[in-house]
Amino acid sequence: MSPSPTSTFTDQLPEDPITENYKRQVREACFSYVTPKQTKSPKMLHVSSEMASALGISQTEIESDNFTQIFTGNKVLKNTTPYAMCYGGHQFGNWAGQLGDGRAINLFEIEQKNKKWCIQLKGAGETPYSRGADGLAVLRSSIREYLCSEAMYHLGVPTTRALSLALSGDQVMRDMLYDGNPALELGAIVTRVSPSFLRFGSFEIFAARQDHKTLKTLVDYTITHHFPHLGTPSKVSYIQFFAEVSERTLNMIVHWQRVGFVHGVMNTDNMSILGLTIDYGPYGWLEGFDFGWTPNTTDSQNKRYRYGNQPNIGLWNLYQLANALYPLIEDVKPLETILESYKTDFEKKSLAMMRSKLGIEMYESTDAKLIQDLEDALLITETDMTMFYRKLSRFKKGYASEGLEIIKDAFYKSKALSDKVIQQWNVWFEHYDERLKIENRTDAERLEKMNAVNPKYVLRNYMSQLAIDDANKGDYQLIDELFQLLKKPYDEQPEYEKWFAKRPDWARDKVGCSMLSCSS
């Protein structure tokens, strides 16, 4: 490979002294060395040339067998030492103890164009943190993670990235629905890329074990390498560090709400310390607008991680991080102030985000009421969120009576609207029209601004499932089609117009299209 791989993580942080790869509790160490599992007959299915370019990897290298061998774990580069990270976490609100990289293996770091990237394989075999699992991944979940990582990046949502998607050539046993019916599936490996894969749980594990020495070492490392603008690590910079993590987390979640993304499993071990979307498991996009929706079957009863609760869970998770950092700060007040700021900042940023989705630039005190009335209207009949906001951009000032006609295709049952529903929408469009008349923007200017924040195309679950179904038959064309489509989610792309559509009826209750499990 052209760039020279390094690893500040293993060079500067305490390692697990045990080198054998067996499942165990790892103490006073940030990672364990582990070698990826040799695969039977790896095959590269897709590569993000954009991500490869950012890493300094040429097209010639991408097409080589060497690339395939490295990014399926079959070849370990000279002078590199793959490793799995140790961390803990709160899962569904309960402390779960040690978790760690159960099926992720970090290969090395690459510095390119003054930016450092960590390269990680997901599905490359067991680690000391695999618990009862095999450390492998299957094709269906790997396609979803690969496509979504890059789709989120192009949506402008902070995210980890993906470099490649490959078949391992091995069969993997999975019980997809946790119903006692396991079956063999195609094994796969995704190469994930991020400046860091550190999580809230990376710090929680040492605080829980009262290992304040390792906690301080890790926090100092994190500030030095990922928050260098905060200066020399100290109690002051620890507080500033937490404040910035809080701000980044909030910004990320506001973006999620903007595009209708539901993460599905916001455990603290799935929260990036850099405020990046990480660990694409049972995620989904809102089809019908619904604050109570979650795609995760594991969460179907309590709906802890439902769409409308994501901002609150972000705050709850930050409380856990604050508890973990407290032994180094030893002062509750600044932490509480930061957490209180999250609440007020969310209200401000959420309102600003919603105003941008409606094409509103100037501030008016009635905006919150206009938005609340809109959300009430969206909830009274099943309305596709993505299509609604995209079509709303075509509304013209002075034509309130035509508003319902403009957005009617976003309704799942447009022909069955009651007179009450129609009246509620007409009243809202009258208020919206009056509000827009205050603005200085022309209709064309507003359309352009709205279409820059309201995507036309998102990775709906049924789209991923179609690609998965084809891939299981050996046809990978749809993976590339969706990949290319989602690189320009805000563009019209008339050649892909078929994807600007509501979820089809056949996908409403189909496995993989409406609800998903964590089985991957």
Image (cartoon, rainbow, N blue to C red):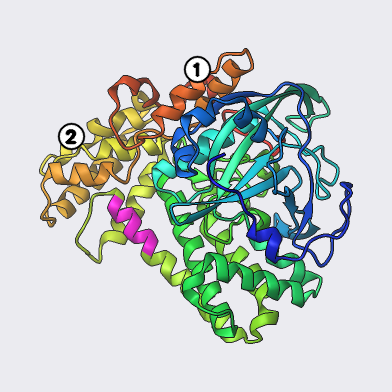
Q: Main secondary structure of the magenta part?
A: helix
Count neighbours of disc 1 (C-alpha within 10 A) and say few if under 14, some if 14 to 19, many if 20 or more.
some
Q: Tell which of 326 and 118 is nearer to you.
A: 118
Q: Amino acid at mark 1?
A: Gln
Residue 402 bears which disc, if any? 2
Is residue 443 shown left or right of residue 459? left
- Considering the image in quadrants, where does the C terminus appear? top right
Residue underneath mark 1? 477
Q: Tell which of 462 and 103 is nearer to you.
A: 103
Is residue 239 shown left or right of residue 127? left
Is residue 468 shown left or right of residue 179? left
> Residue 372 appears in which quarter of the rendering?
bottom left
Count neighbours of disc 2 (C-alpha within 10 A) and say few if under 14, some if 14 to 19, many if 20 or more.
few
Residue 90 in magenta stretch:
no
In the image, the segment drawn in magenta is 349-356
> Residue 353 appears in which quarter of the rendering?
bottom left
Instruction: Determine whether the residue tagged by mark 2 lies in a helix, strand or loop.
Output: helix
Q: Tell which of 86 and 118 is nearer to you.
A: 118
* Mark 1 vs 2, N-terminal side: 2
Position of residue 113 measured from the top left corner of the image (x, y, whole percent):
43, 52
